[in-house]
Image (cartoon, helix red, strand yellow):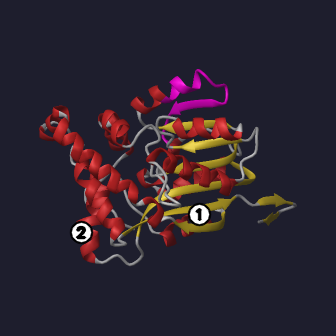
C-alpha cells in the first residue's frame, strides 16, 4: 500500500473538494469520475455515463432497490442510476460544496437523498442497503479495512457491492513510488493507495465474498489526456486559473501537478484502475451461503 509522507485526514479531503469545487466541475464535470472508452469513439460525456452503466450492469440493479453511493460527489451519478434503473439512492459526501449541488437534485426526485457525513463514522443501521457502490472514493478513506467493514455491516444479506478504485500496481519500484504514486496520494489528498491484492484481502476480511475484478486501466486512461488538455487551455485563457496557482494561501493548488502525473502513471503501468465486485453471503441456520 502506498502511503504519502504527509498524513491525510477526512477533514483535508473535505477541504480539498470544497476549495477546488469550481475547478472540478469545469475540468471533470458533474460526475467527477473517469470515463470508460469501450470503442474509442465515445464523446467524453458518453464515456462517463458508460462507466456508470457498466457498474449498474455488474450489479444487476432492480427497480425499487435501495442503493448507497459512498462519496456521491455532486449527485449526478446517483441521479443517473435513479433515472435509468428506478432505484432509491442515498448518497454521502464529505464536501459541503458537493452536498449543496447534490441536494438541489433531490428536490426534483423522491428517489434521491443526500447527506454530509464520513462513511467511516456513518449513522446508517445494520442491513440498510440492497446495494453499495463507491466510485473513486475508497482512495480517500484513511482506514480502508473499516471502509469495507462498513459496507458489510450496512448491506442486507445477499446484497451486492461494487467499487471503482485507483490502484497502485503490485510490486511498484522505488522510482514509481517516489516520483509518481506517493506524490499523487499527497497532492490528491489520498491517505493511501492500495493494490488489487489488498482490495481483495480487505473485502474478504470484512466478510464479503469477492465475485470478480476487472482491470479497466486501458479503457479509462484517456480521461487524463483530456483533463491535461483542459487544464492547459484554462491556464492559457482564464486568468483566475493562473491567479489560483500563484496564490500561496491556496492549500490545494498542488493538485494541478497530479493531472499530468496520473496520466503518466497510467501510461507506464504504475497506476491501475479496477472494478471489484462482491456480495454479502446469506446466513441461514448458522451457516453462511455464498
| Quarter the N terminus occupies | bottom left
The Cα atoms of the two marked residues, 1 and 2, are separated by 28 Å
In front: label 1 or label 2: 2
Q: Which residue is mark 1?
A: 203
Farthest right residue in view: 285
Visible in this render: residue 189? no
The x, y position of residue 149, in whole percent, is 59, 55
Please give the label number shown on residue 178.
Answer: 2
Q: Residue at (57%, 62%) from the top-left corner?
A: 276
Where are the magenta residues, as a range?
Answer: 102-118
Name, please, the residue furthest toward the top.
Answer: 107
| 106 falls in the magenta region | yes
Q: Is residue 86 left or right of residue 187?
A: right
Sequence order check: which comes first, mark 1 or mark 2? 2
| Percent of width and height locating residue 190 | 36, 53
Residue in the foreground of this view, choosing between 24 and 39? 39
Vertical arrangement, residue 256 with respect to residue 73, above or below? below
* Residue 80 visible from this viewpoint: yes
Residue at the (36%, 66%) spot, across then down: 266
Q: Nearer the viewer, residue 137 or 156?
A: 137
Residue 92 spot, x, y in % from top left: 53, 38
* Disc 2 element: helix
Residue 243 falls in image quadrant: top left
Of residues 28 and 115, the one drawn nearer to the viewer in this rendering: 28
Q: Secondary structure at mark 1?
A: helix
Quadrant in the rendering for residue 264 = bottom left
Give the residue drawn at x 47%, y 44%: 45
Residue 102's tag is none
Q: Residue 105's quadrant in the figure?
A: top right
Q: Which quarter of the rendered picture does the C terminus lie within?
A: bottom right
Graded by Cα atoms within 10 Å as few (under 14), some (14 to 19) or many (20 or more), the crowding at tag 2 reads: some
Callout 1: few (<14), some (14-19), or many (20+) C-alpha neighbours within 10 Å?
Answer: many
Amino acid at each position: 500500500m502506498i502511503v504519502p509522507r504527509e498524513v491525510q485526514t477526512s477533514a483535508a479531503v473535505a477541504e480539498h473538494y470544497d476549495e477546488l469545487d469550481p475547478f472540478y466541475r469545469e475540468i471533470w464535470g458533474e460526475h467527477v469520475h473517469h470515463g470508460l472508452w469501450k470503442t474509442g469513439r465515445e464523446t467524453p460525456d458518453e464515456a462517463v455515463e458508460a462507466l456508470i452503466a457498466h457498474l449498474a450492469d455488474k450489479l444487476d440493479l432492480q427497480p425499487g432497490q435501495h442503493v448507497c453511493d459512498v462519496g456521491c460527489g455532486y449527485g449526478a451519478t446517483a441521479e443517473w442510476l435513479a433515472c435509468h434503473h428506478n432505484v432509491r439512492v442515498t448518497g454521502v459526501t464529505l464536501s459541503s460544496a458537493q452536498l449543496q449541488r447534490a441536494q438541489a437534485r433531490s428536490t426534483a426526485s423522491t428517489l434521491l437523498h443526500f447527506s454530509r457525513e464520513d462513511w467511516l463514522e456513518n449513522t446508517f443501521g445494520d442491513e440498510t442497503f440492497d446495494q453499495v457502490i463507491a466510485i473513486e472514493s475508497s482512495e480517500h478513506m484513511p482506514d480502508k479495512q473499516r471502509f469495507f467493514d462498513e459496507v458489510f455491516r450496512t448491506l442486507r444479506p445477499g446484497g451486492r457491492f461494487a467499487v471503482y478504485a485507483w490502484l497502485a500496481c503490485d510490486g511498484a519500484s522505488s522510482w514509481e513510488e517516489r516520483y509518481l504514486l506517493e506524490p499523487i496520494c499527497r497532492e490528491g489528498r489520498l491517505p493511501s493507495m492500495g493494490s488489487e491484492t489488498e482490495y481483495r484481502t480487505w473485502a474478504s476480511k470484512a466478510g464479503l465474498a469477492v465475485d470478480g475484478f476487472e482491470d479497466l486501466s486501458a479503457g479509462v486512461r484517456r480521461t487524463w489526456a483530456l483533463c491535461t488538455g483542459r487544464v492547459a487551455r484554462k491556464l492559457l485563457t482564464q486568468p483566475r486559473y493562473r491567479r489560483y496557482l500563484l496564490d500561496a494561501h491556496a492549500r490545494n493548488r498542488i493538485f494541478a501537478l497530479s493531472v499530468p502525473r496520473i496520466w503518466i502513471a497510467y501510461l507506464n503501468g504504475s497506476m491501475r484502475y479496477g472494478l471489484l465486485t462482491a456480495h454479502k453471503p446469506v446466513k441461514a441456520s448458522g451457516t453462511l451461503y455464498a
